[in-house]
Amino acid sequence: MRNAALFDNRQNLKLSFASRQLQRVADYSIGFLRYENQMGRFDKRRVVWEFEWKNEVGETIDHPGIEGRYFTSPPYHHQGMFMATREQLVAWKTRGPECKFDRPVRREGYHRERTSGGLDLYDTMYCNVTQLLPLDSVEDLYIHHMPNKNNERSPERTIATIDLHKKRMNILKKSDKKLWVDKFGKYNGIKMIIDERNKSLSLPFDLTQYKDYVARGGVLTSKELQQWEWSEPAFEESSR
């Protein structure tokens, strides 16, 4: 009987925890990052231009249950769209301090962006929802802004997505977190193999660095971050 009572208590604790987690779903919303192709460069690299990224991506979100796994974009969180569950939309109808997400009020300046682009959603004066961008898979949440020209209007804020990736890596190096591993701590990211049946055609690949990278759980070292920098001339393709 005692074992059964202990089991019941554990089950109740689990259910209570799950209930609290569900109640907090309305506090968060998955974030998106709009990118453009930088058409003025020969490689047309992907860039993010809507935020003033500093030397780091910013501190990871330390809320209970999600600490160290997510970060957020610098204000304002302009992302062009949002995604929500039915439960979240219902909760945001009455969410404080002044969300009223079911009947947006027209205000001066950028009304469409405030209601559809996520500005009101993440604004502490309106919905006060926390934007979540995952450290390990933020590339899955990139949205292509197809005009590919808005980045030209704010060159001081333009950052290549590869540089944003490096900023994420710097956070991982500080915290020693391994996000690209399975439940056993084994790396489960991109696999690299040499599979050339005709050995005379095989390039002289050296997978030593890759194997070290895998052993660290998919985290780059400071030396590698510097070593893999390169500079390319930013000129029009037509001038080549």
Image (cartoon, rainbow, N blue to C red):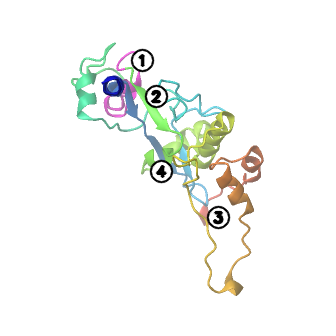
Q: CA distance from mark 4 to mark 1?
A: 30 Å
Secondary-structure class at tag 4: loop
Residue 225 x, y percent position in the rendering: 72, 47
Secondary-structure class at tag 3: helix
> How many numbered marks, from 0 up?
4
Q: Do the CB atoms of the residues marked 4 and 3 lie less than 8 Å apart?
A: no
* Residue under label 3: 239
Residue 161 x, y percent position in the rendering: 57, 47
Residue 52 seen anywhere in this rendered image of the structure: yes
**What crowding class fits label 1: few (fewer than 14 Cα within 10 Å), some (14-19), or many (20 or more)?**
some
Q: Do the CB atoms of the residues marked 2 and 1 lie less than 8 Å apart?
A: no
Residue 169, image quadrant: top right
Q: What amino acid type should be assigned to the residue bearing mark 4?
A: Asn
Q: CA distance from mark 2 to mark 1?
A: 22 Å
Which quarter of the image is occupied by the C terminus? bottom right
Residue 100 x, y percent position in the rendering: 26, 19
Residue 118 lies in magenta, yes or no? yes
* Residue under label 4: 148
Residue 170 x, y percent position in the rendering: 67, 39
Q: Which contiguous range is marked in magenta?
A: 110-127
Q: What amino acid type should be assigned to the residue bearing mark 3?
A: Ser
* Residue under label 2: 65
User: If you read the primary sequence from the N terminus, does the residue marked by circle 1 or circle 3 appear first?
Assistant: 1
Q: CA distance from mark 1 to mark 3?
A: 48 Å
Residue 22 seen anywhere in this rendered image of the structure: no
Instruction: Classify 60 as above or below 158.
Output: above
Which quarter of the image is occupied by the N terminus? top left
Q: CA distance from mark 4 to mark 3?
A: 20 Å
User: If you read the primary sequence from the N terminus, does the residue marked by circle 2 or circle 1 appear first?
Assistant: 2
